[in-house]
Image (cartoon, helix red, strand yellow):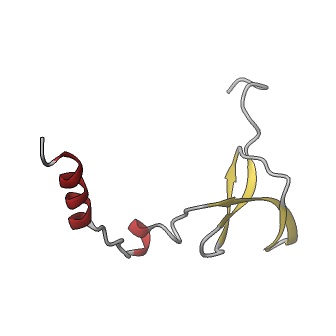
Amino acid sequence: MKPGIHPDYHPIVFQDATTGATFLTRSTLTSSRTIDWETAAGVRTYPLVVVEVTSDSHPFWTGSRRIVDSAGQVEKFRRRYGGR
């Protein structure tokens, strides 16, 4: 790799806005918010990024499914375009 052309890749904590679950990973994102994280070497401070959806709250990973009102959507479509 060429030196000086790659973004800073550092440890960062992501927090799910829905469930509040947090996990430590690495990213190029930056944040002014910080969080204290317990590690084997003691408590360290890492940048914190709050995200809307993670694997902790996404329906695909949790197994929960959203009920889609397909009948209501069909009726709405027919009201708009059914007479044409």
Quadrant of the frame with the C terminus: top left
Quadrant of the frame with the N terminus: top right
- Of the pair 84 and 44, the residue shown nearer to us: 84
Q: Is residue 30 above or below residue 22?
A: above
Q: Is residue 83 left or right of residue 4?
A: left
Q: Is residue 43 above or below residue 28?
A: below
Q: How many numbered dots are placed on residues in this image?
A: 0
Q: Percent from the top left, x then y, of residue 60?
A: 39, 66
Residue ID at (36%, 71%): 66
- Of the pair 80 and 25, the residue shown nearer to us: 80
Residue ID at (32%, 72%): 67
As drawn, the residue found furthest toward the front would be: 83
Q: Is residue 19 left or right of residue 44?
A: left
Residue ID at (19%, 45%): 81
Q: Is residue 46 above or below residue 67?
A: above
- Of the pair 49 and 43, the residue shown nearer to us: 49
Q: Is residue 56 above or below residue 80?
A: below
Q: Percent from the top left, x then y, of residue 80?
A: 24, 49
Q: Percent from the top left, x then y, of residue 12?
A: 74, 57
Q: Percent from the top left, x then y, of residue 23?
A: 66, 67
As drawn, the residue found furthest toward the left would be: 83
Splitting the image into 4 quarters, where does residue 21 fall?
bottom right
Q: Is residue 45 left or right of residue 30?
A: right
